[in-house]
Amino acid sequence: MRDELAYRLPKAELHVHAEACLEPELLLQIAERNGHDLPYASIDEVRRAYEWSDLGAFLDLYYRHIEVLRTETDFRQLVESYMSHAAEQGVRHVEMFFDPQAHTRRGVPLATVVDGLAAGLDSGAREHGISGALIACFIRELGVESAQETLAELAELPAFERIVGIGLDSIEEGFPPPLFAPLYAQARALGLLGVIHAGEAGPGENVGLALSVLGVERIDHGVRCGDDAASIAALRERGTALTVCPLSNVRIGMYETLADHPVAQLLRDGLEVTINSDGPAYFGGYIADNWVAVQRQFDLDVDDLVTLARRSIAVSFATAERKAQLL
Ligand code: ES4
Ligand code: ZN
């Protein structure tokens, strides 16, 4: 483990997509095992493909690479790979997103996906003492009905108990939060919590809408909330946390450089900011790498880092007992 405080502080990661933990080496290994043809002859060629101009271009590559994942072993290895990196980054609890529809639409059974991911969480607990749960994210552009059908299928699985919440990801523009009100109502009825990617590529007002209409517990990204006074007011009033992912936003091209990123302003404004990786295999860093980048860019001090660490645990969906262990 690296000795800087950013790495050592016990923390929770609250915004990381399992499928975006697919490091180039693992991508090639799984593709070969499954006889899946990829247009790369080497790791270097894979790495060269990881450059995009916007969220859409990133998502195209992300969904293409996801196609190598077919077996329970593939999904378990994906999480295990994340867990060994996360342990070195001081992660003690993780709430991991996955995209069920990205797999069912290619004919991979839901049970294969969830059982594999759950086995990966078990390895993380056993080998690294990292507690974990899953958050099922739905692909917004597939619409509310597809999401609702998929959620109903998830609820039938024995491993459903590993899922603590739902989220929405993928394309944000053109799919405002209120479209998904029935999905969030269904999730609540199943005992699940709610999060949502909002105010990332879409307008800041999506943050306020997600809070007022969907009643979500956390906002993923939310970095554009500053554009909308009602969203800021709602975040303050409810004390809702944002799961900000600075290196992801810069890598996807939302901000030209980290210096242009609003994370420091959001912290100074007293919002409940957490800093996360989003997709460590794609965006140039795991969680503590994000913390260090922000620390260096904006001169965060020891108190700032301790606040980030404690807050990440406090706003997690871990049990009260687990939080007490970690805080
Ligand atoms: C995502 Cl960075 C990002 N934004 C929206 N949807 C996503 N799915 C995976 N990564
Ligand atoms: Zn994300």
Image: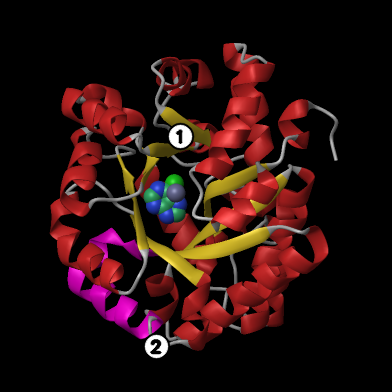
Q: Which is more foreground, mark 1 or mark 2?
A: 2
- Looking at numbered disc 1 in the image, what kind of residue is underneath it? Asn
- Comparing 21 with 326, the one in front is 326
Q: Is residue 227 left or right of residue 257?
A: left
Q: Which residue is mark 2?
A: 156
Q: Are marks 1 and 2 in contact (CB under 8 Å)?
A: no
Residue 82 visible to the viewer: yes
Picture colour scheme: secondary structure
Q: Which residues are magenta?
A: 137-154
- Comparing 186 with 178, the one in front is 186
Q: Main secondary structure of the magenta part?
A: helix
Q: Is mark 1 within 8 Å of ligand 1?
A: no
Q: Quadrant of residue 249?
A: top left
What residue is at 19 percent from the left and 23 percent from the top? 229
Q: Quadrant of residue 170?
A: bottom left
Q: Position of residue 131 (x, y in %)?
A: 66, 60
Q: Residues within 10 Å of mark 2 (few under 14, many from 20)?
A: few
Q: Position of residue 89 (x, y in %)?
A: 74, 42
- Magenta highlight on residue 148: yes
Q: Position of residue 101 (x, y in %)?
A: 37, 73
Q: Which residue is mark 1?
A: 249
- Magenta highlight on residue 146: yes
Q: Is residue 287 above or below residue 214?
A: above
What residue is at 71 percent from the left and 57 percent from the top? 130
Precedes in sequence: disc 1 or disc 2: 2
Q: Is residue 187 left or right of residue 9?
A: left
Q: Position of residue 206 (x, y in %)?
A: 21, 40
